[in-house]
Image: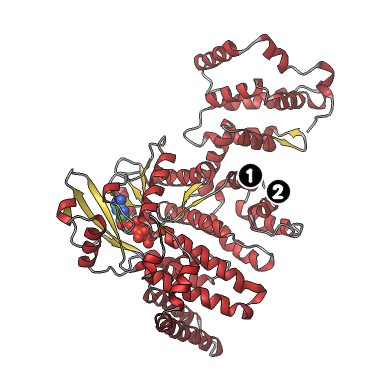
Amino acid sequence: MSPKTLTHSGEKLSYDPRIIASYYHYRPWLAWSRALKIIIGFGVFFLSLKFDEWLNRNQRAKDKRANQLRQLLTRMGPTFIKVGQALSTRPDLVRKDFLEELVKLQDQLPPFDNKIAYGIIEKQLGRSIKEIFSDLSLNPVAAASLGQVYRGRLHSGEEVAVKVQRPNLRPILTLDLYLMRQAASRLSCWLPLNLGHDLTMIIDEFGAKLFEEIDYLNEGRNAEEFATNFHNDSCVKVPSIYWRYTSNEVLTLEWLDGFKLNDTKRIRAAGLDPEEIIKIGVISGLKQLLEHGFFHADPHPGNLIAMPNGTMGYIDFGMMDQLDESTKEILVDAIIHLVNQDYNYLAEDYVKLGFLAPNTDIRPIVPALEALLGNAINQNVGDFNFKTITDQFSELMYDYPFRIPAKFALIIRSLITQEGIALSLNKYFKIVEVAYPYVARRLLTGESPQLRQRLLNILFKNGKFQWQRLENLILVARTDGSFDVLPTARLGIQYLLSEEGKFLRRQLLLALTEDERLHTEEVQRLWELVKDDLQPNRLLDVAFSMLTKFSREGAAAMIPKAPSFFSTPQN
Ligand SMILES: Nc1ncnc2c1ncn2[C@@H]1O[C@H](COP(=O)(O)OP(=O)(O)OP(=O)(O)O)[C@@H](O)[C@H]1O
């Protein structure tokens, strides 16, 4: 019996700490020899850190230690490389110089023997290499922490990438996870604030994710779900999966022949516009977070590919995560509150998202946020730099009880990575210049009742209509190439005429006649803003289509009863 068979439950291979514990309980020699290796490796490292402290060593010595830590994790194998990769997203837990080294754990790692890899393909797929491929590269094109990738061609002619998992991965991971769990529960009484208990849960969560990642059938399913979410978006390319040649440990997928996003030279040489590629990257990232809720949690430059036809390809769907409806909505709120500099609401968003505990007194935090973010936004939305903000935020974490919920560690890393890639292609890139127009466009087109409610929340402050905000939103949304005022206007009118728009109708009329005057200047300013887009013939089309749907009853329902015109608004 091996941990491999032990963790099989039907077709699905899932992480079960109890089964793993009982397996190693009866094989203590396996656990002890591995534990010794780990204790010696990390023991020497921590002693050197202590020596640096006692001897008051300089920055160069510190840099050397960070590099040693990365090498140590690589030597210790896949579980530790993955721990390092996960910690590289946690500025709240790891010091800065270590973080910078840990990020490098994504780079090339030593490959394993080609013969072994070929053997795994044949055994897993139950056919010889020659039977499956007309051609397969002798060496891998890339080696990563959990597997390596070959380039090949099927007999039917399609070019494919073949990802083969490192041998014996499951026993290696289960043993390390078992030891980490043992250490966490034994050390719990020595750790502050009952952290030991939490640590066991964190290890279990990590183990479950890792097991998902090494199930290539799961990765194939993720890729297909991701592709379905983007099926209407011709800017995003997702490779097809060849299920006939895919198993738990071998993944065969369409080869994407393009340029990695950090390969600026080749991107430019191919005549591609880096600006456009960046835009696709940021907007598709936002769509995943704010629309689909199913996001690629590992979008490092190696996993994003600029295609020769100007689209952007995604690969590596092993690490995906899901956001629920309410989290997506709060994220939209947070972006709006940030741009409108409503720090009180922003602090409340942080509580709702779990960055602050529910009973936190936000009063002292609001001015701190204002000092930090107000400065960063600096009157100009485009000056916002995500990396600087998160660096400054990590400092705020020492003074206030901020924590990064695990899910957001991935999102934040994903945003910083996207911005980093973009900055490497264009050093003047401002993520918000792309992101905010997208959010503004989505709000103005108000596709869902939740989004429409959000638009109302922005447009009315303390019951008063914010003309300036509407102007700003239209201005910003127009900088997003795909924003067209006309369909938005049509949606707006439809909404106004609908039952749902009753409240807005009333509020708009009140706003127009506020302070007992007709607000013609504001309406005039808005008209100036949109009139060029509203060409007479297109406008007539819309008006005609609206009129055909309009009834006398509808018109009557639109107009509030006269006495209520100037009464106080009901919320
Ligand atoms: N469909 C594909 N087309 C072209 N190249 C690919 C494809 N899939 C993988 N590769 C190449 O193989 C490399 C590793 O693939 P992938 O990222 O999927 O592996 P991984 O084991 O999940 O790595 P990690 O999680 O460490 O990023 C990619 O960076 C890319 O160079």
Q: Quadrant of residue 73?
A: bottom left
- Label 1: how many Cα within 10 Å (few below 14, some 14–19, many 20+): many
The quarter of the rendered structure image containing the C terminus is top right
Say whether residue 290 is visible.
yes
Residue 218 pos. (x, y %): 39, 52
Between 401 and 358, the one nearer to me in the picture: 358
The numbered mark at residue 564 is none
The earlier-in-sequence mark between 2 and 1 is 1
Q: Write the residue at 19% across / 58% down.
A: 137
| Cα–Cα span, label 2 and label 1 | 9 Å
Q: Amino acid at mark 1?
A: Asp
Q: Amino acid at mark 2?
A: Tyr
Contact between marks 2 and 1 (CB within 8 A): the answer is: yes
Placement of 28 over or under 464, stated as above or below: below
Q: Quadrant of residue 106?
A: bottom left
Q: Is mark 1 within 8 Å of ligand 1?
A: no
Q: Write the residue at 57% across / 79% down.
A: 186
Between 124 and 313, the one nearer to me in the picture: 124
The numbered mark at residue 345 is 2
The quarter of the rendered structure image containing the N terminus is bottom left
Between 426 and 403, the one nearer to me in the picture: 403
Which secondary structure, mark 1? Answer: helix
- Label 2: how many Cα within 10 Å (few below 14, some 14–19, many 20+): some
Say whether residue 89 is visible.
no
Residue 529 pos. (x, y %): 59, 28
